[in-house]
Amino acid sequence: MTTSPQARPEVVRPGRILGPGDPAVVVHQLIKRYRDRTVVDGLSFSAALGQVTAVLGPNGAGKTTTIECCEGLRRPDGGTVEVLGLDPLRGAVRLRPRVGVMLQDGGLPTGARAGDVLRHVAALHARPLDAGQLLDLLGLTAHARTTVRRLSGGQRQRLALAAAVIGRPELVFLDEPSAGLDPQARLAVWEVVDRLRGDGVGVVLTTHLMDEAERLADHVIVMDGGHVVAAGSPVQLTGATDGTLTFSARPGLDLRGLIAALPDGMVASEPSAGQYLVEAPTGLDPAAIATVTSWCAEHGVMPEGLSLRRRTLEDVFLELTGRSLR
């Protein structure tokens, strides 16, 4: 699951027509320093068109600096970055109409009306999406005549997303796209991201919301200390099988017989009165679940609320980066 710093990812040259599955972003041995502090140290990864790539990491991991190097906002001190086959600094003019960038602070003119802002951005592109439809999709139609400064934080966030995607970009960078949004607005943002992927657009997003990354991402990169510490699909990182079976029953069950019947490595416990856990480090299978239910039947135990719990991306993230505050 970890990436090898020696293996250089494929680079797509500018003359080649790109399509879904081709690398939209290729970062190789990236180094970025601020004075005497190295914040990105030999980092390598790639992100594909037609996929959502989530870059995760605790505060200070180097993810924002990495994305800013990809966006051409910072100059690397070492290594290479290629975006759609071009250097994001030298190729900035050619990349501008092809890449959408959503910054967390939006960068929107606060005195302009929301609808006017979006229509202005649309006019800068040859084949923009319909501004009215995009406003409607993101729940902003009723606020189209409201100035940006009078929008709520969540409304400004959605307007920034609309401005980033209205030009039909081939690649979009999204910084915390649903930060601070209510559940309905989050779902609207997720729908936009799903549509982008379906249209073959590459999406690179940073987020602190593990459920968002698990829901949206095809590929996840976990950073810490300026390095990639793990990479893979959410299923690869969390494991394809469930690892914990929980149920409630009368307190004080003698679990020794159940433990003896379970496959090697599996354990059963009662962490609190009447609450039982059956854990399998390598995942539960149907036979193990049948063993538990058969044992319950033999002992007259009604396992209420029987449920499976799999490892989540948040579990993996905390295992890799620790639980200490940064």
Image (cartoon, rainbow, N blue to C red):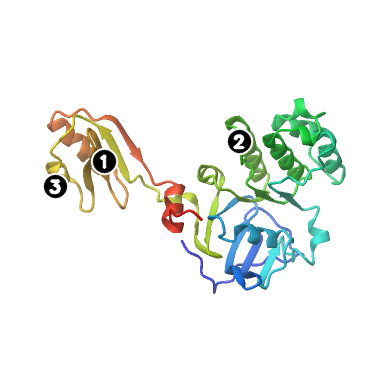
- Judged by depth in the image, the label closer to the viewer, 1 or 3, is 1
Q: What residue would you read off at disc 2?
A: 186
Q: Is residue 23 visible?
A: no
Q: Nearer the viewer, residue 65 or 59?
A: 59
Q: Earlier in the sequence, mark 1 or mark 3?
A: 3
Q: Amino acid at mark 1?
A: Leu
- In the displayed structure, does residue 84 sit left or right of residue 267? right
Where 94 sits versus 136, above or below?
below
- In the displayed structure, does residue 263 sit left or right of residue 99? left
Where 46 sits versus 190, above or below?
below
Where 84 sits versus 106, above or below?
below
Q: Amino acid at mark 2?
A: Arg
Residue 222, x across and y down, in percent: 52, 57
The disc label shown at residue 260, or none? 3
Q: Give the spatial CA distance, label 2 vs label 1.
A: 33 Å
The reply to whether callout 3 and callout 2 are in contact (CB within 8 Å) is no
Q: Quadrant of residue 257?
A: top left
- What kind of element bears circle 3? helix
Q: What residue would you read off at disc 1?
A: 277
For the point 61% across and 38% down, the residue is: 180
Q: Is residue 264 visible?
A: yes
Q: Residues within 10 Å of mark 2 (few under 14, many from 20)?
A: some
Q: Nearer the viewer, residue 151 or 227?
A: 151
Residue 200, x across and y down, in percent: 67, 48
- What kind of element bears circle 2? helix
Q: Earlier in the sequence, mark 3 or mark 2?
A: 2
For the point 76% across and 25% down, the residue is: 142
The disc label shown at residue 60, or none? none
Q: Give the spatial CA distance, label 3 vs label 2.
A: 46 Å
The outermost residue toward the top is 142
For the point 55% across and 72% down, the residue is: 7
